[in-house]
Amino acid sequence: MSEPLRVAVVTPYYKESPAILQRCMESVRAQSHPQVVHYMVADGFPQHELMASWPQVRHIVLPHAHANYGCTPRGIGALCALADDVDIVSYLDADNLFLPGHAASVVQVVEQQRANGVMLDAVFASRHLFLPGHEHLRLKAEGEGVGSPFVDTSCISLTRSAGFLWGVWCRFPRSLTPACDRVMCSLMQHHQLKVMWTQQHTVLYESNWRPTYLQAGLEPPEHGLHDDTLLAVGEGLTPEEIWGLLRVQHVAGNAAPAVAPPAGARG
């Protein structure tokens, strides 16, 4: 019997509280798949005391902060995982969580398609939203799902056939990093990756966006929202410069083109 596929989970962290980081790491430790390795990458603010109590986690410390929405530490962690010969990399932001079956559902899709002669490059999961202090909420992410134009970072898993993209987060110009998941979706489309959806909501996303508060019927806070971070995406770069830097075509309105599963590889 062949060995189970090895899954790396890469989490960049910056100035999150120990409680948030522990919540994230516990969700990875609870994965039902037997071969999961968690890479926590400190973006200039390592929490050595906390990480000392998690010896099974591979802790990577960057000497200075990049503060680019986790892009540089995410890419470096993924490249370390690639060098460690893992089969699949999943990305999990520090304030998000995986449900226990997340890695297993990704592996199942990859193995099922492999048995059918299809080598997938990427697998997408779906997410539910919750609000800080309201962890019990399971709100629907409107406009997302199979064939949608947007896939959140924590819902993306890449196989080794897409290894050339594992570390590409490091190359994103700073003005694009607030929309890094949209940039990655554009790259995946440009390279015509074979992708499939698990059709399972295995990601829990902590939302600091105004529309989510309104969806929940709650008053948005005056501070701490992320809405303004998208106002200057791509500022200072022409479409030609973006294309030259990343091989990503600029789309008006900062919207990513659709990343739909190719024929024969739909979930």
Image: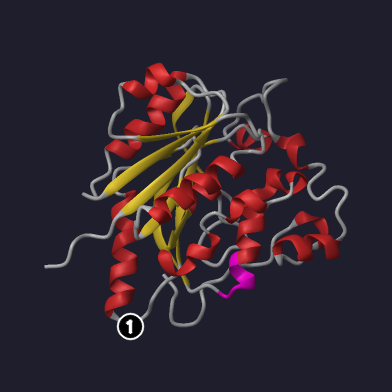
Looking at the picture, the colour scheme in use is secondary structure
- Per the rendered image, the range of residues in magenta is 188-192
Q: Residue 103 in the image: state x and y as whole percent.
A: 33, 52
Q: Which residue is drawn at 55% across and 23% down?
A: 45
Q: Residue furthest top?
A: 49
Is residue 77 shown left or right of residue 212? left
- Looking at the rendered structure, the kind of residue marked 1 is Gly
The residue that mark 1 highlights is 117
Q: Residue at x 45, y 25 (%)?
A: 20
Secondary structure mostly seen in the magenta stretch: helix
Along the line of sight, the residue nearer the viewer: 161 or 199: 161
Q: Residue 265 in the image: state x and y as whole percent.
A: 44, 77
Q: Residue 160 in the image: state x and y as whole percent.
A: 41, 65
Q: Residue at x 44, y 44 (%)?
A: 10
Quadrant where the C terminus is found in the figure = bottom left
Whether residue 22 is visible to the viewer of this picture, yes or no, is yes
Quadrant where the N terminus is found in the figure = bottom left
Let me know if residue 79 is in the magenta part: no
Is label 1 in a helix, a strand or a loop? loop
